[in-house]
Image (cartoon, rainbow, N blue to C red):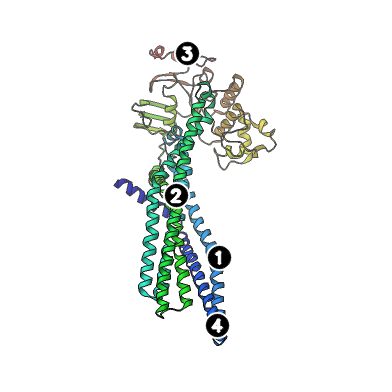
Amino acid sequence: MKASRSSTRAMLVALAAMAPRHLWLGGMALASLTVLMGMALLGLSGWFIAATALAGLVPATALVFDVFMPSAGIRLLALGRTGARYGERLVTHDATLAVLAALRERLFRSWAPAGAAWQLRLRPARWLQRLTSDVDALDSLYLRLAVPLVSACAAALLAAVVLGAMHAGLGLLLGLWLLLAGMAIAAVLALRARRPALRRVAALERLRTQAVDLVAGQTELLMAGRLPAQCARLAATERSVAQADRQLNRLEARASMAFGMASTLTLVGVLLAVGWLVEQGVLGAPGAALALLVALAAMEPFAALRRGAVEAGRTWLSVQRLAPQVVQAPAAIEIKVTEPPPGCAVRLQQAAAQHRGSPHRALAAVDLQIPAGTQVALIGASGAGKSTLLSLIAGELLAVHGQVLAQPCTWLTQRTELFQDSLRDNLRLAQPGASDVQLWQALEGAGLAADVRALAEGLDTRLGEGGLGLSGGQARRLALARLLLHPAACWLLDEPTEGLDAATARDVLQRLRQQMHGHTVIVATHWRREAETADRLLWVEGGRLLADARRGTTDFDKLLGRLREDAAVVAAPATAKGF
């Protein structure tokens, strides 16, 4: 509990530091000024109308009654209230949007260290929820809780001062009543809305996950006969969201009624009090109108807390969820990359790796040294640890034991990661400052230049989500162009031709080999066509390096012979025991 409270406090401090202090304070000051000028406008208008009516009853009084100063004050307050409202909206939203932008950047940075990509792959819907719904929920902290709370307190203070000038006891009682009634209603609403708000958040997260599963896996679900069941689950979750929404709407409606009753009680109490003061001769009719209208407007700012109180449970849950990433982000992103001695591309010394949440090590005590400019093929059965070894070299996975020294690498993974953006910007992910000439050279090297020139907008052609608009072969060539564009001298290739037809695969490999000169290349593969030009073959099995065969040796030919060009099946592990 103490750890949770300390992380929450640290989170709030971090959020407060993400926007300049003058924006936070300026927004609250402008919001309070808007409320105060609105109350003053209403009270002055009531006083002026009552005073003008009474002055008109007596001609002598009407002649000397000053209508210019009150009317000028009314106009000033009306214009000032409009300007303050505009400024308040501008400043508070500027502060909020600045914080949300900085928060998203902090979250991206907290997910950048080694191992974070694995977590994103395991639970993408959860992390998407953090980045969208949880971040958006934090705007309630300032816009719907802090700003209305300060404005409400300012309104209570003004009402207490105005009525206190007429009668000290009345002003004190009114101020205390406004604070106690307004805060009590908001607090009770927040407590009662917490449980349905949390249920709604959980149901929305389930709804998003189930919808993604339904859309992405509808073919598999249909083949397994589970599509109707998945649709029924989705509908049931949607009903849960609707039920939580109804509960929250009922609570908000009851809170509106409570604030209305409190406002009515306030008005009745002030009416009786000022009636007594008028009867005692302490107060005139214009002053009574002023007091009544100020009291009438004083409860309205407290009613603005209603929305924030309803969302308070969701907001605090988001604070607790995001606190670990936000508070620990600065320390987490400081990754030190240690390079090997000159002439060496990769050096592993008793390096062991373990995936988070797994009780077993994915790699156990690997010793490996790869000179710069060498071409190495990692071979072995699926799940043997080839991709894990590449992750270790790339720095995406930290060693739990031993030492890993590696040159900066660029990694062509099995999946082609393309984004909903232009071709030019997808390429520039590898080298942000690349010119169009360099982009075209990379496309020529990947064999995609002719296809891009055939497009109406060329490099400005926009891709859909995940590279929609390109075929599988074109997407792979675009990823290859990014590889060629990257300045790193060490290439990591994870089954670079997987999923391509034979002709496209041969062309991609040929272009890779033309560009390999001067680069260290480490390729994880099942295919003989990808391994046959390597200088070394490394046999990986069960997370261990069982064989290291050099070109020109018998062991190299034996290992290469076990890779089948068509079926891409590695020979049974037991046959490799002799190496």
User: Residue under circle 3?
Assistant: 562
Sequence-first disc among 3 and 4: 4
Q: CA distance from mark 3 to mark 4?
A: 113 Å
Determine which quarter of the picture holds residue 455: top right
Q: CA distance from mark 1 to mark 4?
A: 34 Å
Label 3 or label 4, whichever lies nearer to me, is 4
**148 w.r.t. 461: above or below:** below
User: Residue under circle 2?
Assistant: 138
Q: Amino acid at mark 3?
A: Arg
Label 1 or label 4, whichever lies nearer to me, is 4
Element type where label 3 sits in the image: loop
Q: Position of residue 493 (x, y in %)?
A: 50, 27
Q: Amino acid at mark 4?
A: Leu
Label 2 or label 1, whichever lies nearer to me, is 1
User: Residue under circle 4?
Assistant: 57
Q: CA distance from mark 1 to mark 3?
A: 80 Å
Q: Quadrant of the C terminus?
A: top left
